[in-house]
Image (cartoon, rainbow, N blue to C red):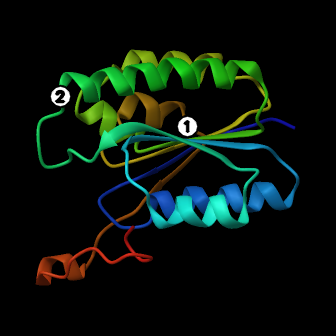
Amino acid sequence: MKGYLHIYTGNGKGKTTAAFGLAMRALGASKKVFIAQFVKGKMYSEIKTAQRYLPSIVIKQYGLGCFIEQTPTQEDIRAAKNGLEEVTHIILSEKYDMVILDEIFIALFFQLFTVEEVLEIIKTKPRKLELILTGRYAPQEIIDLADLVTEMKEIKHYYNQGIEAREGIEY
């Protein structure tokens, strides 16, 4: 069976949630799943759930916290680059049926690595691999290669009323 390239992007909520939903569906079909989270380096509820109930999903974070409102440090850049290198080896190993690169577009936006590096991963992915990329600001060059692109569009969000992120809902 051919694997496809999925993109979940846009300013709306739900990109990571959609990707984790696909991971659960893949597990139900006895597929092996690896999730790489770029930029993120905190314990989010989806990780707690996977560790507790879905231990066969492998999740690795390549972030050192969350610098979204700051400038990334050299350590942030190094963690992302090392992560991209490790993920490349994981993808080429053909050990997994599905690989999710969560927040990879945010890593690109902050120039932690280049679009060309990500394009190379996409172009060399094994034929059977289902590859899912998430994050705001998906570059057009990657959108053009994708088989499925979903844009989450924010129409209204309670953040704008000063509501803080809530455990179990936003993280």
The answer to whether 47 appears left or right of 109 in the picture is right
- For the residues labelled 1 and 2, the Cα–Cα distance comes to 31 Å
Q: State the residue at coordinates (60%, 67%).
A: 49
Residue position for label 1: 146
Q: Which residue is mark 2?
A: 73
| x and y, in percent, of residue 4 in the image | 68, 39
Residue 3 showing in the rendered view: yes
Tell me the kind of residue under disc 1. Ala
Q: Secondary structure at mark 1?
A: loop
**Could you tell me the amino acid type at mark 2?**
Thr
Quadrant in the rendering for residue 116: top left
Residue 104 lies left or right of residue 113; in this view the side is right
x%, y% of residue 77? 28, 24
Left or right of 127? Residue 29 is right
Category of crowding for the residue at label 2, using alpha-carbon neighbours closer than 10 angstroms: few (below 14), some (14–19), many (at least 20): few
Q: Of the numbered discs in the image, which one, if any, rests on residue 39?
A: none
First of labels 1, 2 by sequence position: 2
The label nearer to you, 1 versus 2, is 2
Q: Secondary structure at mark 2?
A: loop
**Within-10-Å neighbours for mark 1: few <14, some 14–19, many 20+:** some
The residue shown at (41%, 77%) is 169
